[in-house]
Image (cartoon, rainbow, N blue to C red):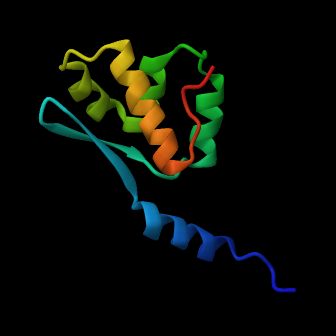
Amino acid sequence: MAAFNVNSARAQRLEALGLTWDFEVDGETFSLPTEIPRRSAHALAELKDNDLDGLLALLMGEESYQRLCQHEVSVQDIAAILEAYGQDTGLGVGEG
């Protein structure tokens, strides 16, 4: 039996999903990563379940997060973004 090739599996995922998952707010495009590095996952685990700002800042990077904050985005908007992100990428982030 051949060993599971992590690099090949990662390449297939990235080919299917791309490097980023994009969403649009008020005509401006923002991106979230389709793969989360383990060190980021540790930081995500330390966030409180309802820390949407911390979650987005960590995933998007501070500069992109600050650009997003310039828009009137509701908690429901963020929940919809995270739900679509999870469905499309298989990443369950922002779940309580």
Q: Nearer the viewer, residue 16 or 8?
A: 16
Residue furthest to the right: 1
Q: From where the camera sits, is residue 76 visible?
A: yes
Name the residue located 57 percent from the left edge and 67 percent from the top edge.
10
Q: Is residue 64 left or right of residue 1?
A: left
Q: Position of residue 6 (x, y in %)?
A: 67, 70
Residue 63 appears in which quarter of the rendering? top left
Residue furthest to the left: 27
Q: From where the camera sits, is residue 57 visible?
A: no
Q: Position of residue 12 (x, y in %)?
A: 53, 72
Residue 3 higher or lower than 60, as above or below: below
Residue 47 higher or lower than 59, as above or below: above
Q: Position of residue 61 (x, y in %)?
A: 37, 36
Name the residue located 25 percent from the left edge and 20 percent from the top edge.
69
Check the picture and name the quadrant holding the C terminus: top right
Name the residue located 27 percent from the left edge and 17 percent from the top edge.
73
Check the picture and name the quadrant holding the N terminus: bottom right
Q: Nearer the viewer, residue 12 or 43?
A: 12
Give the total of numbered labels: 0
Residue furthest to the bottom: 1
Q: Nearer the viewer, residue 43 or 96?
A: 96
Residue 73 higher or lower than 89, as above or below: above
Name the residue located 53 percent from the left edge and 65 percent from the top edge.
13
Q: Position of residue 22 (x, y in %)?
A: 31, 46
Q: Nearer the viewer, residue 45 or 63?
A: 45
Residue 42 appears in which quarter of the rendering? top right
